[in-house]
Amino acid sequence: MKQNKLETVGLRKVYPGTVALDNFSVTYEGGKVHAIIGKNGSGKSTLIKIISGAIQPTSGILRVNDTDMKMETPLDAFQQGIATVYQELSLIPDLTVAENILLGRLSYKKNSIIPQIDWKASYLRAQQVLDGMKVNIPIDSPVKYLSVGQQQVIEIAKAMSFNPSVLMLDEPTSALAQHEVKSLFNVIRTLKQKGVGILYISHRLQELNEIADTVTVIRDGLFVGKKEMGHVTPEGIVHMMFGKVEQKTRPSDLKIQDETILEVKGLTRGQHFKDINFKVMKGEILGIAGMLGSGRSELLRSVFGADSFDSGNIIFNGQLVQAPTPSLMKSLGMGLTPENRKEEGLVQVLSTNENLCLASLYKMGGRAGYINKKMEEPYIHYPIEKLQAKVPRRDLPVSSLSGGNQQKIVVGNWLNTNPCLMVYDEPSRGIDVQAKQQIFQIMWDLSREGISSLVVSSELEELLEICHRILIMRQGRIVDEVFPEDLTIEKIYTMCMEV
Amino acid sequence: MMNWIRENNPLKKQMLLSILILLCVLLSMTARGFFSVDNFLNILRNSSMKGIIAFGMTMVMIAGEIDLTVGSAVAFSGCISAWVVKTMVAMGVSPIAAVICGIILALVAGFALGSFSAVIRNKYEVPTFIITLALMTSLFGLANLITRGFPITSYPPWFNFLGGGYVLGIPFPAIIFLVVFFVVNFIMSSTTFGRSVYAIGGNMEAARLSGIKVARIKVIIMGLTSMLMALSGIMVASQIMSGTATTAKGWEMDVISAVVIGGTSMSGGTGSIKGTFIGMIFLGVLVNGMTLLNINEYWQYVVRGGLILGAVLLNVVHEKKQMGSIALV
């Protein structure tokens, strides 16, 4: 019988300028669930990509059942016994369950001159895969009629149809509801009993207790340790993830004024968030901490009017806003730097100049709506100088700028509207350390001018550095309110990770 | 301050213009009767009817949409105004009042049709390609129903001025063409409205999150463009002195060709009214020249098709080159 063992020996991956993964050696036995955990930028994704065959290591060996692997493409990995199920579903919605499971590998009729699909044999094969997983899903249903949880199971079935030794699941529960997670775990346990080695990537610590047998922590591209789940506490795991970190704090002169800018009461939106209540005071920097999928971005978008909500009240600047839209919230003094700069923040084909004037167009043009170069100048000079953006040529498309400078243009676009509350969704995503500090500096400067900020970030140590106050969000609810002074990084991560 | 790719790129602007000039020089030497004031005015007049629609279409395409109703809408508005004139005159209304009513009704119906497409687009997120394809088909049918298959010749003689008259020796449609050019060019380059259109086409979500009223602006530009089609339809009806359901067939292709030749991107966000102006004249000169050279009509189609593909390829290659140079900055 196969042992279904995966071994990595001295894996190393070098990118220009950085070593993403170094000397990573570990052995994963079959018939167990091995969790792999690490914060953003720890080298976790690099490891996943190497194991799935998406990238090749600079040096080092992957071994399955004592055989060295030769992997140049993800297909090689599948054929040599490592199947990966990615976070994003890759099913074809209009095809049936069976067709998706056997995509590109349907059975053909044997005695036919022209190639002809043997539907009976194909469906039988697919049904066998599902039976092996003890799953009951109609095999002839188009995938689009299944729930997300069922679709996730079909993804796993597709991987299992290759009969792999090792199955890697990348954040399989991130899009699932609570009861769906339970049935997914049942599937995973069934596979475990069959002796498959399962690598389980997740940032939900609570799940690990329930499903994992061992946990491997990776930090700064290095193997920190592999522990039996029974021998380690959640705090211990978080400590392994972060090591010793110096905790930075905001400047001491930032004052909160006794005036409510924004009040949110009982805001609810379907699956995304429920009964959200909070206040933002004048000059305050309020953080919302939560992991991906906790509903934090959706909450910000609803407050700004980018998405609708089901019930609840938003009171902004003393005015009850019934149906917020971006243009209404803008006129009342709110600005949003969205999570996704490229798709939502900037018009890439337009110049830096034009992007800086985007939100303040109507203000600039006044009633007549006439604009010319001269009128634009103050809207361009001021933010570029204030934000220290490096813009070699302002008349070139904004896509020519680096990520950090693009982010400054997004912020500058909104500062031009004279907001009293800036909403930042993942403000430091994809920008360098220096630009990150400059963005923080801007938030602090604005706070001194009495402009409040509402910040969402999955880099929780950043929230500890910039905020006056932090709300903890978990599964669509605000579960706690904390102050950076009373917290350590381990503690805030543990709070957000549902332990 | 205009966008670099869009406006301040001397190479691209001059490229089209210099090819146009080269073409004119070549035709002047080879085609008898090309180089004359009369012929140039003729080209201008022939370009006018499609040209005023092309300016609207440029706005629509910069916003990332399209409108295929052109030919049908032109025929429809000519027919409906002719029908109104016929009916009202029969009821004893004076011809001048009837003509004014007919024109107003056609323009209003035009705006309503275009904004209807945009409202459907906004509400159900159906591509305007499909909506206007459907509308194009229905309008063709309606135009024929109104005329019962025969031209309606109800216009009073002086009505011919709109499509066939002259002011100081310049064809009246050409004057309208130039007026529409200046107005739309001003809107697109010097107003908040125009800037919003570019932003919407470049990135609709970013525009929306910047507080730009995306839905409203789309309704206005699609409505205006459709209204320009109605204006064009009235001038065509005036030129041929009848409401004819079969007129202007296939115009949408000529209009879209001119816009694309003028450098507007099919994916939205870039383009200019000046470019469309040159593109329209380019097409007009080419057709006129080929006709004067007695080139077979069907060869003319082959050449025009090649021209459209060539112009688009030129734009794409050029844009890629620029992207390369930008990355180096």
Image (tube, rainbow, N blue to C red):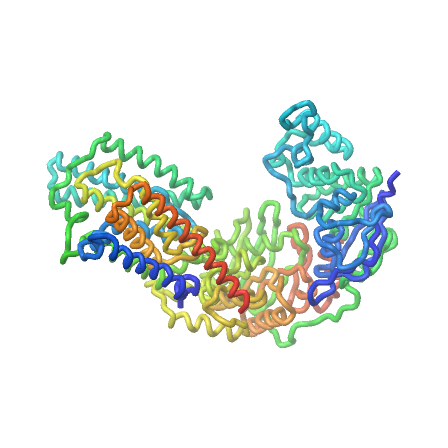
Left or right for A232, reference B13: right
> Is A465 or A109 nearer to us in this picture?
A109
Q: Taking the image as drawn, is residue A362 in sight?
A: no
Q: Residue at x 48, y 64 (%)?
A: A397
Q: x%, y% of residue B78?
A: 23, 41
Q: x%, y% of residue A309?
A: 54, 49
Left or right for A70, reference A260: right
> Is A402 or B252 nearer to us in this picture?
B252
Q: x%, y% of residue A154?
A: 69, 37
Left or right for B114, reference B163: right
> Is A238 or A253 nearer to us in this picture?
A238
In the displayed orientation, state which residue is furthest to the top: A111
On screen, A73 above or below A463?
Answer: above
Q: x%, y% of residue A85?
A: 71, 45
> Is A260 or B109 nearer to us in this picture?
B109
User: Quadrant location of residue B144?
Assistant: top left
Q: Taking the image as drawn, is residue A323 in sight?
A: yes
Q: Residue at x 50, y 57 (%)?
A: B206
Q: Residue at x 40, y 60 (%)?
A: B195
Quadrant where the N terminus of chain B sits is bottom left
